[in-house]
Amino acid sequence: MVEDVAVARSTAAHDVSSRFVLERKAFQQQYSSLYFVRLKKLERFVRDAAQKKWQSEDLQIATRTLDIKEGQRVILTGTMYKEMPQKPSILKQLEKDRFASELQISEKNFVDKDDVAILEDAYGRVRLVMQKEQIDSLVTGVIVALMGSALASGEFQVEDICFAGIPAQVPAAVPASPKPKYVALVSGLRVGEQDRNPLLSQLLVDYFTGQLGSSSESLASQTVRIIVAGDSLLTAEDAGETSDQASWKRTNANAKRQQASLAAMVKDLDMMISELCTSLPVDVMPGGADPSNNTLPQQPMHRCLLPLSAKFSTFNAVTNPYECKLDGKRLLGVSGQTIEDILKYTTLTSPLDALERTLEWRHIAPTAPDTLGCYPYHDEDPFIISECPDLYFAGNQSEFGTKLVTGPQGQKCRLVTIPTFAQTGSIVLVNLVTLDVERVTLEAAI
Amino acid sequence: PKKARRDDDDDLEMIDDYLMDEEMNAYDEMCMPPESDDVGQDDSAVAFDRALQRPPLRQLAPLMDKVVFQQTDADFYEEGAGPVIRLYGVTAEGNTVMVHVHGFQPYFYIQAPPNCLPSDCAAIKQTLNKRAGGTVADVFLETKQSILYYSGSNSKTSFLRITLKSPKDMNKLANILSAAIDLDGNGQRSFQTYERDLDFVLRFMIEVKLVGCSWVELPAGKWSLHNDRTSRSQLEAAVSYKDVIAHPAEGEWLKIAPLRILSFDIECAGRKGIFPEAKHDPIITIGCHVSVYGQPDKPISRAVFNLKSCGEINGCKVVSTNEEVELLRQFKNYLIQVDPDVITGYNIICFDIPYVLDRAEALKVNDFPFLGRLLKSRTRMRDTKLSSKAFGTHESKQINTEGRVIVDMLQVVQRDHKLRSYTLNNVSQEFLKETKEDVHHSKISDLHAASEDGRRRIASYCLKDAYLPQRLMDKLMSLVNYIEMARVTGVPLGYLLQRGHMIKVVSQLHRKARDMDLLIPDMPRTGAASGPQYEGAIVIDPKKGFYDSPIVTLDFASLYPSIMMAHNLCYSTLVPKTRLDARGAPVPQLNLTPDQYTKTPNGDVFVKSEVRRGILPIILDELLKARKKAKADLKEAKDPFLKAVLDGRQLALKVSANAVYGFTGATVGKLPCTEIAGSVTAFGRTMIERTRNAVQERYTVANGYSANADVVYGDTDSVMINFNVPAEGDGMQRVFELGRDAARHVTEQFPNPVKLEFEKVLFPYLLINKKRYAGLYWTRPEKYDKMDAKGIETARRDNCRLLVEVMNSCLHRILVERDVQGAINYVKAIVSDLLQNRIDLQMLVISKEITRAGDDYDSKQAHVILAERMRKRDAGTAPSIGDRVPFVFIKGAAGAKAYEKAEDPIYVLENNLPLDTAYYLEHVLKQPIMRIFEAILPDPAVLFTGEHTRKIAISTPTNSGLMKFAQKQATCLGCRVPLGPGNNRAVCAHCVPREAEIYQEKLGVVTQREKLFNQLWTQCQRCQGSLHQDVLCTSRDCPIFYMRVKVRKDVQDATEVLRRFDF
């Protein structure tokens, strides 16, 4: 037995960013302001990057897409917009929605041969002529610089494209002791899933509470914090979806989901989290399936939902996206919707690639608000990545993936895509000192 | 300039060149831009893009070259020597041509006095000239015959053809003749005139066999250059009318010249709450889109004219001026340089063009209103009113833009399509499947005043609106269809939109009559639709019900035309009532044996074609033959443009053939003949009945068929047969065979060319009432093509969306899914949702247009009263004349009238007013739904009574009088128990254990609304085509407009509720 060996758990300084917290929501404003701020803030970086990238070309940067003359070779900057015939649209749905039975939103990829890329700046739009593959690798909402020339048709022939690039990094403080400290990332607990193996979540608890007694226990004991990156529940979201779609004509939401079973699931989760909280700090991010608001940024799950856990000082209900400083390292993470949405509108297949793109685009969620719900921010865009994180992760991905990205100024960022725990039993441990990654897979045979 | 070398004949070249040079010098002078010595001629102020200009005119020598062009417009003017016809057109190369056609004089006929001899003509001319001031040019004696009535085998008599020097004297002279005059010294008598009603231009076209939009040739050596240039056409020629060659629109001459089409739209800065008036409110933007026929996707120019500075727009010429006067001038210069053959837009005849002209007058821009091709012709407007049985009364304007045909797409769509609403928004939704951003005119002023950006916004909005009519025109193929209609009926293109349907038949009748020496009498116009009424087409009473076996539909192909042909019904074959004896047979003097005439079911007598062939049957025969040929050619044709032309033609031919019957029946028409119209419908009725009898006699068990056939319904030209063969197994196949057999069998019983056609089977079939039915439509036994619904509130959207939705869903469930119980459950669910206030407001909005000022309405109409109420609340945003007023019915005091219950949906949303759901149920949904289910359920009323109607929810208004006195106190979100003053927590102590559950319920509402908020507002961003600018659209036709307004409030409310958990 290991209980009698008192293992001192490492601790680490923790500092949560409040930029995704919404104290008071107002819905009088539209989305244009969000796009406008995004463009204004990122345009500068995109222009700098473009000038650097195409230095030898000696090209002018057009201040407005409208000013370019036919045949002139210039650099244009603006917001990407992709016109996609397959893109789900509420209008199309309404037109079609004669018979509720025919209604289905298919979870698929919406890329189509007729997709059109458009660049928009604060003044106007210009249609782009570019390689189809290039179009397919972009999404709406990304701020870009394009090199090319205007055609007689009023379109713009794109030769090359440039993004804002990885932002600058504030060097992390050198840790006091070189002793390894780990942060554990887990996502998709899916408490309540029908065919879920209930032993698996118990195993997870046991692993961190030191009751497994295996040799890897030292890893567990060196873990300073666990971040639960979304989809902790299998809520009635799936069950409620069909009625949701038909509900556009019924104002009263079908809010009453299977309350009883839901309440039971939340209780199970509360139990599990509180057990974890007994031995280490737990940050719980909401995900698409969790009881939080659906659009980004998702607000912390309410205390009343997890009353047991809420009693622990080690319990942290946090936002999605989530940003914090842990032991001097900057962590940034999402529960996965942003990546999922990008994969729907591009030909990218690897979540890790998509995650890397967002870093390069300097934006966590470019597709919001167009195809990904988000709050209509007025004078800010909190999703801009203004500082390069040391660790950037996305939960609930189809596959585990990791990569250490090195920026042109030596920025180092560890990217991690966390697979769904309920399906894989995987926990990802990231060494906060070295940014090395360990994947621990728990297996519970029934 | 050196002439292009001809390499075939060197010897002649010298002479050619010599001749050419002389001609060319003369011509070059004329090609110079017109001098700016007159108002309306200052074209050179702004030279737009060179590319805009027409291709340069190839040098033509009158003696060596012919001129060939497609004429698009025609008019006439008078000069000393008499009237001169002007033909305007475009050559195949795209050059504009105007031809002065000299020498043609107007004429008409009267019956000659008895025993009149050719030698008497001179004296008659003198007599006439004495009375009419020397206007008569010639009097001829001709042998002709009136088109009216059969009056014996050889009834040609003498007529006097009176030729005048000027068309304007026509009526004066005719009035003298029809009053009383002594022509032959035998005393005063009045004369019936013939063919003086005919439009002079049309008279000319008939004379030279020229049809609308056809190709005209001026042969070499027969024409000359017109010496005193009067137009902006590239070539101005003169020719004698005798030398004009009119090419029939066949073969090579089917082609269409590269016509230039200008589509435009204006925006005005109106004052708050007042629809823009030209006297006060400036034009701030004019958007133009120019294309060439056949190349709709490649505009040759896009331009926008702005008052005050405006940002650039991609692919568009932006012209900004600081003075409105300058803006108008620039626009006019542009128009002159573009030199369009067709001007289009949406509602331009009643709004844009009058506004521009009135505005120019208000600003005293005297050189503005010269928009046609003629240099000195001022563009004027004249109010016209067009009344027609088919499309009601429309007020319009006649605007002269010589050489340019105005095709207002609003009028085109109104004429050719029945729609719920004719706003550009709705029309483009209907035909282009696109929603259009709709910015209210009050917002336009704000945007314009705000900034350069705002003005750019307006400019691009305006350009879109200028482009849409053009796209509609292409999509509906309006231009080619109208061109073909002009060719088929022989009237100029412009007449088709400016005048009623009658002119088309008149033109054909005159053309044919002329060939046959028949004359058309001028009938006195009766003011109103008096005259004898004849019985309409009666139907076989429907056997209402839901048929679960295939129903065969047999249609008479072109029923009315074929009846007229089969029975030789015509003005010229009718034996008038006065020449029938007591038994209704022709009097003996006519020498008609019983086998030489037909007595129609309503007792009129027409001679058979062996005695004399009627003119209407001949016209119809030709039209239908031509249609057959056009359809055959269409099948062969490969070229898409030729296809479009041929399809337009066959459509025009069909419409024209059917119009002939209408012409005889139009009691206020030019030549009404109730005997013909009445006989046609009477024949139609008997034919339907005979068809029924023939079918029911033949297809019986006694005759070896598996079941007795039954005719369940018969309408104007179709019969629906139930063969009582179930669809299962090879049933469908068998029904199709039976249908074909029945069509063949019955057709044999009718005279040629009456033909019964079998085209479709309806199965299942829901027969609700006369002209109200629905079913799946099968044209082959394997699979149905579509759902066919007639007279049911489905396609027609003149009601709220909920009704349309419910009707469609019911029919779909009943017919396609064949799930009657499902339909019943569905209706019950909707009824229940409605009563519990769960139907989205958007679904309940009804809207009507204010067409007149409030005082002009006799009865109190909901939308008019509401508009007045809204004006009192806020004059700035209240709807005014021409606007559509959307409204919903709210709960009113007991016994409140419907118009008192109408309320602005936005106001309802803001104040949370309760909707009168019971009213919707009773007055909107019930009747139409009951009608559907009557055929299916023994007691359809159960849909609206019973368990599902017991739960009712009503929202509490926030502005009612009572609420002002109520103390607000928070209640527990779980059990609604008051929490006591000052306590604003979410739940009471009792509900605390359930807090998580209640929280999740409220969260669910937030989640759903946030999602909707996102979907709706991003949709509007996509629609307006901009991410960085606020959505301005206020289109109330848009299916998401109210949802968008509502969700803002809903999401905020739900969020506030959720916040209570944070205390």
Image: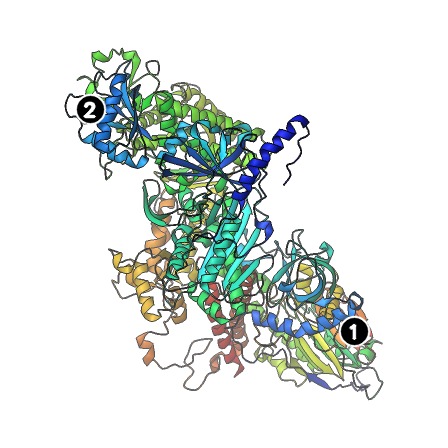
**Residue B382 image offset from top left, x and y in percent:** 34, 48
Q: Is residue B1019 left or right of residue B882?
A: right
Q: Is residue B552 left or right of residue A269?
A: left
Q: Would you call the spot at circle 2 few (<14 residues within 10 Å), some (14-19), or many (20 or more)?
A: many
- Where is mark 2, residue-wise? B183
Q: Residue at x 54, y 54 (%)?
A: A92
Observer-nearest of B378 and B987: B378
Q: From the image, which quarter does the N terminus of chain B lie in?
A: top right
Identify the image quadrant of residue A223. Answer: bottom right
Q: Chain letter for mark 1, please.
A: A
Total numbered labels: 2
- Where is mark 1, residue-wise? A414
* Secondary structure of residue under mark 2: loop
**Residue B440 image offset from top left, x and y in percent:** 44, 63
What's the residue type where badge 1 is placed? Answer: Arg
Res B285 seen here: yes
Q: Would you call the spot at circle 1 few (<14 residues within 10 Å), some (14-19), or many (20 or more)?
A: many
**Residue A27 image offset from top left, x and y in percent:** 51, 73
What's the residue type where badge 2 is placed? Answer: Leu
**Residue B530 image offset from top left, x and y in percent:** 22, 36
Q: Residue at x 52, y 61 (%)?
A: B459
Whole-angstrom CA distance, mark 1 to mark 2, is 113 Å
Identify the image quadrant of residue A412. Answer: bottom right
